Image (tube, rainbow, N blue to C red):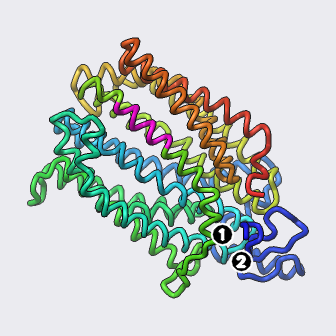
Amino acid sequence: MSLFEAKGLRGFFAPDREYDDIDGSDINGTDENEENKERKLNDSDFTASSFLQAQTSADIRRAILKLALPALVEFGLMMLVQMIDMIQVGVLGPWAIAATGLAAQPTMLIFSVFSALVVGTTALVARAAGAGDRDYACRVTRQSFVIVLIMGAVITAVGIPASGSIIRLMGADVDTIAPGTIYLQIIMAGTIFTVGNMVLAASLRGAGDMVTPMISNMVANIVNLFGNWVLINGKLGFPRWEVAGAAVATSLSRMIAFIITLHAVYRRDKFIHISVHDSYRIEPNIIRDVLDIGIPAAVEQLIMRGGALLFARLIAGFGTIMFAAHQIAINIEGLGLVPVMAFQMATTTLVGQGLGANKPELSEEATHQSTIISVCLMSLVGLIFFSFGKYAIEIFTRDAQVMSLGASALKILALSQPFTAVYFILAGALRGAGDTKYTMYISTIGVWGIRLVLGYLLADVLGMALIGAWIAVVADMLVRMLLVIKRFSGGQWKQAMA
């Protein structure tokens, strides 16, 4: 049985078919049922109705901002904490920056496997939210949650003993093998909390609740910063654990974020609600629906993370100084991506909700409005990178070579910011529509066909080193932008899950 034969989703794509409302009753009946549905949605703190009733572009912009602003705060704090992490670790020396950077690449690659559940959950919950089907949204959440916990436990069991070999495969030098291994082992130990929070937060965002993930991550970030100060430097009577202390603080903060998010979905007044009394028996049809959307997204993430890993491996071959500059530039770039990440998240949610309510015109207009806003914001980010990049590098290190290389990388990166804005928003729209296969193809072409190949030619063959590698990054984003524009303009995404 396909998604569109499943109970609760029968009406997503056919207005003359019936589908279930928030409590399972037919909504194709009387006006009283419609009023009852709206009341229940409001009582459940459900946020899709205002967007679905939008009449003007201004209404849609308000709906976008309502979702994007909490996400902006959340992602901004996350990236800021990552930067502060780097600053706190950077005090130990370039070897510490390189060690944590090398450990971060395989970690992100491993976590990208869970994108199958994260993206699939967000898309299906957003569709269910648009249709007002709370029961199906909660069932999707429970199924994804169970699967991700099982997978997380397996990753932890395998990842901890394999950490040393992974760091060596990354091309670590003698100064970074030991600290990189310890850092990766500790991060692996907290995997189950990380991935559990990822799925629950994805479900809440799909339903339009951006505030709960924001709060959980705000608290976690405070814990992370305080933990870094205590454990890296050996404050308040604790031993000086240096890089290991940073890893412990990170894992502890992720556990706290998981606990807060889990508590939120146990509340009955939320649109997304799960309980220990619910059935957690595996439902193959729901898992299949999640994976039909999610597997291409997971493959895309694997492609991107695998490419990033090889890209990092390429740069690591030029030495610790070069890699430290690269890692600092990546962290600054991450902070610059916060605005477009927030608007991408809002776009993904609204596109799914619009299509779930059989209103593709709202989904399309939401995407256009998000794109306009994001291009303006990211052009400003590019200007800041170009004009003030060297001052940002100085926050992380006083090493003259690292500062010079990092500032040059940011100037090159500034050129790609408008391309990045368009790509992020349109790709987010395609994912919200379930058109994840095409974004997978785009990423394959961009990362492996452009970034890695051109990066190798410029950085290694032509001897341009880090500068050549970052020129390839700009070319990658330009190609991906052009390809995603072509797909979105074609309109196939409106029927991606039909």
Image position of 320 (left or right of 194): left
Residue 184 image point, x, y percent: 27, 51
Residue drawn at 11 percent across, 59 percent down = 238
Q: Residues within 10 Å of mark 1 (few under 14, many from 20)?
A: many
Q: Amino acid at mark 1?
A: Phe
Q: Is residue 387 visible?
A: no
Which residues are drawn in magenta?
A: 303-313
- Which residue does the numbered mark 2 point to in the structure image? 22
Pick out the residue farthest to the bottom: 277
Label of residue 46 in the image: 1
| Picture quadrant of residue 397 | top left
- Dots 2 and 1: beta carbons under 8 Å? yes
Give how far apart the Cα atoms at labels 2 and 1 are: 10 Å
Magenta region, mostly helix, strand or loop? helix
Q: Amino acid at mark 2?
A: Ile
Q: Quadrant of the N terminus?
A: bottom right
